[in-house]
Amino acid sequence: VVAAGRFSGNLTFTGLPTIYSANSQHTGTMHDGVTMDGWVGTFDSDLNPLWVTRWPESPIGATEYGSRCLGAAFDASNDIIAVGYQCNATCAGAVSKMAGSDGTQAWEKKFTDVQSFERITMSTDGSGDFFVRGKSLTTTGVATAANPTPFGVSCAADSCGVVARMTSDGALVWARTIEGADYSISYFSGEIGLDATGAPYIYLTMKDAAKSGPVSLDSGTPYAGCKDDTTS
């Protein structure tokens, strides 16, 4: 089993060394002045902990929220792909690959035009790709000084949901945006579902689509959102 979450101060699982928060001074603004870090861990079939690691981390002195791992999954090689967000003065969507044997990080990517990634589902077509969903910032998706590591998609709405396919090394294959949709970290609305028949489709739910106005078939990324602009 792979599990993930967030913590402050220290985190102890029976039989494993204690993990301490990277932000040991607790100078952040979340949870009564305590900035949080994310964690990822694996457990055997009896739920005995095998390893736990701190990811993503909030830098010491972080002033905005806390970092958090919101989803993790085994790939075909039994390594781990984890998603979430990392916060300092602002938050960035984060993705990481870790060795399934001990949690050693193979790579990490942070996207400055994504507020957070909330869900991950592995593809079953043998490609090694995975699907993520999240919430993006209003941006052109172009690299700038304020947006140095963009995810590469644009959305004109104040609130914009995004679902994407990525490769096993964290490269973007495609992305679809839904203007007005809010994939909230506070109120989950289900996983990214694969078609049970094996057809090459995915399914997902969203909340607040069209909240900032009608969403037509061609708003956001083409073919995302509602087919009928009177439907929310």
Image (tube, helix red, strand yellow):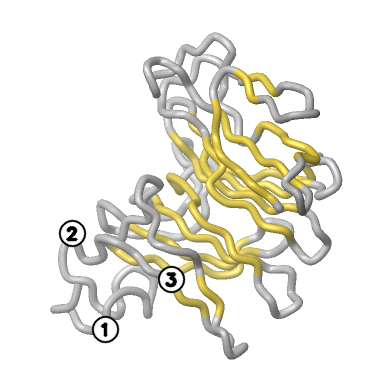
| Residues packed near mark 1 inside 10 Å, few (<14), some (14 to 19) or many (20 plus) | some
Distance from Cα at disc 1 to Cα at disc 2: 16 Å
Residue 26 sits above or below residue 149 on the image: above
Amino acid beneath label 1: Lys
Q: Earlier in the sequence, mark 1 or mark 2?
A: 2
Pair 2/3: label in front: 3
| SS at mark 2 in the image | loop
Q: Position of residue 22 (x, y in %)?
A: 62, 20
| SS at mark 3 in the image | loop
Q: Which residue is mark 2?
A: 212
Q: Toward which corner of the image does residue 104 lie, by quadrant?
A: top right
Q: Position of residue 152 (x, y in %)?
A: 50, 57
Residue 211 sits above or below residue 112 on the image: below
Residue 160 placement, left or right of 49 = left
Residue at x 29% of width, y 80% of height: 217
How many labels sit on residues? Answer: 3
Residue at x 43% of width, y 32% of height: 90
Residue most toward the top? 25
Residue 191 placement, left or right of 180 = right
| The C terminus lies in quadrant | bottom left
Q: Which residue is mark 3?
A: 204
